[in-house]
Image: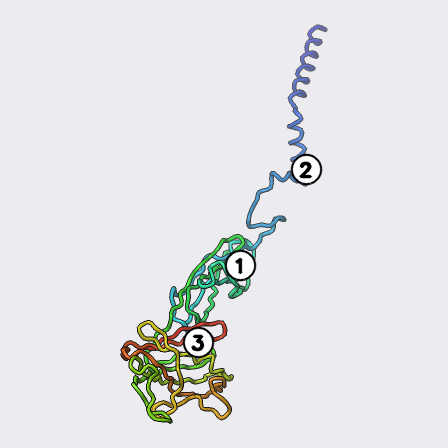
Amino acid sequence: MKRIILAVLILVVAVSGCVNNSETPENSEATNFSDNPGEVPDDSQVVDNSSTDSEGFEKADVRTVDFTSNRDQVVNGGNMTLTVSVENKGGAPGHYEEGIEVAREAGGYDDFSLLEEINTTELGPDEGTNISKTFRMETVGTYKYRIDEYNGGDFNTSVKVVPRNLSLRESYINTRPVKMTVESFELMDSYEGEDGEVTPEKEYSQQFLFMKYRAENMGSENVSALDYFQLNAWTDGEKFDETWHAEDAVNYDPFQDEDYDARYNYLRPGEVREGYLSYQIPKTSTRDDITFKWAGEVGLQRPVVYWHR
């Protein structure tokens, strides 16, 4: 009987030892971690999300999604509109702040300068808007516009500005604003001056061209005549500068002034100045060959306007 009891005791001790050996250090650590919910896992266990900042808060991501112009080509003196489309792709409200830059072909496309700052009101997540800016185009040439974003890349568009072509008696208003009109012109072999008949310097190869113009200051400030009065005659691809202002009844002298030559005087607000300019052009030129070109400098602007018969 004693032998049976001893054998049972030995068996119990052996089974108890097997159960204790099955508990591993790894199982113990897992049990401890689950028992301590305040413990934070290491960085490798944190998920990276671009819509949140380093502290896990939602952040805004307002960016350009499109950039367009309403026309590819415009005559000088016309308007062109640029439209920026933006959208908040982030998870928090935010603002859009970027600049439209411009470069002119003649100056090199790499020479960009700031044209306009673009700012929006606050945009919520997934909210978008369009911002449009209208510009008057004066100087002939091709222009490239861009929005250079840090993350979104470049958005580009371009516009070509071409000369304005008018018929006689049509007007052009520059940015001063001065309204200029070429009303008519005459071809003459000679005319009567103060000392009798006047003929061209090269009598057998030249003729006189008299052009009648009208200029009106539509602004509120004085305008120098040099700012608007730069009209040349063109025929067969050749330019002819004004030679003088006629002095007889056929041609009214617009520059008679009590003080001094009105070429260096001012056109006052609301004032209208009319007169004729005289040119000497080849005798072979006909009325259909003649074009008048105004390429006046208005500040940094270089508008080009043509008048044709």
Circles 3 and 2, Cβ within 8 Å, touching? The answer is no
Residue drawn 46% across and 75% down? 297
Image location of residue 276, percent across then percent down: 37, 86
* Mark 2 → mark 1, Cα distance in angstroms: 39 Å
Q: Which residue is mark 2?
A: 36
Q: Name which residue lies at 69% across and 7% down.
A: 4
Q: Which mark is residue 296?
A: 3
Q: Residue at x 51, y 57 (%)?
A: 148
Answer with left or right where residue 104 lies relative to residue 203: right
Quick one: which residue is furthest to the right in this view?
Answer: 2
Is residue 114 or residue 109 the one in the foreground?
A: 109
Considering depth in this image, is 241 or 75 the residue closer to the camera? 241
User: Of the residues shown, which amino acid type is indicated by label 3?
Assistant: Gly
The kind of residue on which mark 2 rests is Asn
Q: Name the spot of residue 180 as percent of width and height, x first.
A: 40, 81
Disc sitting over residue 177 in the figure: none
Where does the N terminus fall, quadrant-wise? Answer: top right
Q: Secondary structure at mark 1?
A: loop
Residue 165 appears in view: yes
| Above or below for 142 versus 189 | above
Q: Earlier in the sequence, mark 1 or mark 3?
A: 1
